[in-house]
Amino acid sequence: MAQKPSIPKGTRDFTPAEMARRNYIFDTIRDVFHLFGFRQIETPAMENLCTLMGKYGEEGDKLLFKTLNSGDFLKGVDHSLIESGDCARLGARICEKGLRYDLTVPFARFVVMHRGELQFPFKRYQIQPVWRADRPQKGRYREFYQCDADVVGSDSLLNEVELLQLVDEVFRRLGVRITIKLNNRKILAGIAELAGAPDKIVDITVAIDKIDKIGLDKVKEELIERGLSSETVDIITPIITLSGSNAERLDSLASLLASSETGLKGIEELREVMTATEALGLNATLELDVSLARGLNYYTGTIIEVKARDVEIGSITGGGRYDNLTGVFGLPGVSGVGISFGADRIYDVLNTLDLYPAGIAEAVKVMFVNFGPAEAARSLAVIKQLRAAGISAEIYPDSAKMKKQMGRADTLAIPYVAIVGETELADGTISLKDMASGEQQRLTLSQLIDKLK
C-alpha cells in the first residue's frame, strides 16, 4: 500500500485561491515599504550556526532548526557523545548550518559583509520565510513568512516614528483595527536596577513578556523560579501593572525610576517617540505597555508590538531598536531599528474577519470557448491582443462539449466567456458573455478590449 502523503506539523500548503489572498497581503506591505523609501534585499534560507546562535536568548537558541553536515557527518565525532545522549555538544559537532530564525540577524550579517557597498542610513526590506522548531498551535507555525523593514546607520528616533506610521498605513489599507504597544528596553533595565537585580535583566524580561499569555500570578512564580526574591518581585509587580493614560504612565515611571539614569533615558526616548507619533495622528491605538519585552536579547531601546483588536491571536507585528547587533559581526557602533510583519498571522486575521476585496481570487478575466482548429486559431490571435493590453485571458485547450467548457469558467469564477464560432469568424467579431448577469453581446476587438479593461 502506498504511503499516505503528509507534510510536517506547523507547515501548510496553499491553494491558488489562498495564494491570491496571501499575495494581496504581500503586495500591500511591499507597496507601503516602497512608499516609505525601503529597498529590497534577500538572504539565504540557511546561515552558519555561528551567525545565529546566541542572538535570540536561551529559549530562541532551542528553537533553531539545525541541518546535518553534508556527507559522513559522524566522521571524527567522539562516539561517547552519541552514547551519552549529550545532544547539545553532539549537535555542535555534526551541524554547522541552520535555517534562519528571523530576518534581522541575517540582515545584520549582510550589513557587515556588504558595508562597503551600502549608503548609510541604509533602509532595507525583506519578504522571506523563516523557521522555528516551535510547538505548532493556533497562529504559531514552524515555517512562516516575515516582512521586515529596517533602518541601520542612524540613531535618530525619527526612524521609530516613521516605522510606526508605516505600520499604521499597512493595517489601514488591510482594514485591520490594531493596537500598537510600545516599551523601551532601557526602562526594563531601570526596573531591574530598582529591584536590585541588574544581572537578572534577561530573566526578568523573559518572564514578564509572558504576562498576556500566562497571567500575572504565573509570571510572579516564574520570576521566583528564576532566582529573584519575593521582595524583588513585589517591587517589580506594581511597575509592570501601571494603569492610566500613556502620559500618566510615563509620569509614574519617571517618578518610580528617578534613581536610575538608564531608566530615565528610556522614558525620555519613549516620550519623544510617542509624542511625535501622536502629533502626526494614527488610525491605530497607541499604548505604553511596561510588561512588553518580546524576549529577544538584541533589543536595546524602543520595543514595538502590534495586536489585532478584533481577533484573539498573538502579535501580528513586532520590532524595536538593536544598537549593538552588528558589533558581534565585527562592525561596532552601527545602530539599527526595524519592524517585522507576521504575514501568516495577518493572513489568519484577514480570513477570520473576511477583509479581502471582492474578486481577489480572480486569475483570468476571460476564457475563450474552443470550437475547433479554425476558431481556436482566431481566438489565440485575439487573446494575444488582449494580453498585450494587460487583460488576462485563456482558451479552453480541447474542443470539448460546451457544457464542460462553461462549467470550468463557472467553477473558477471567471467573469467573462468569449465565443468565436462560425458567425464570429465570418464577420470578425467576438461574442462576450457576462457570467454573472448572463448578458451576451457581439463586439469588435477594440470594443472587447475597452469592455474588459
Image (cartoon, helix red, strand yellow):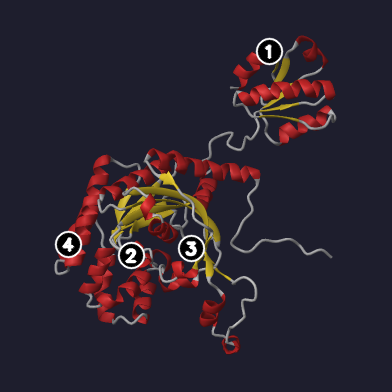
Q: 176 or 451, which lies in front? A: 451
User: Tag 2's secondary structure?
Assistant: helix
Q: Is residue 84 above or below residue 286?
A: below
Q: Is residue 113 left or right of residue 74?
A: left
Residue 297 in sight here: no
User: Tag 4's secondary structure?
Assistant: helix
Identity of the residue drawn at 84% across and 65% down: 1
Q: Is residue 328 above or below residue 375?
A: below
Identify the residue under disc 1.
Answer: 444
Earlier along the polypeptide chain: callout 1 or callout 4?
Answer: 4
Q: Which x, y percent locates residue 129?
A: 53, 55
Identity of the residue drawn at 65% across and 72% down: 71
Identify the residue under disc 2.
Answer: 327
Residue 235 in sight here: yes
Number of disc labels = 4
Earlier along the polypeptide chain: callout 3 or callout 2?
Answer: 3
Identity of the residue drawn at 28% across and 82% down: 229
- Camera-near label (1 vs 4) is 1
Earlier along the polypeptide chain: callout 2 or callout 4?
Answer: 4
Q: Which mark is residue 254?
A: 4
Spot the residue most to the front: 116
Q: From mark 1 to mark 4, how far is it between C-alphas?
A: 74 Å
Q: Which mark is residue 101?
A: 3
Q: Is residue 425 left or right of residue 162?
A: right
Earlier along the polypeptide chain: callout 3 or callout 1?
Answer: 3
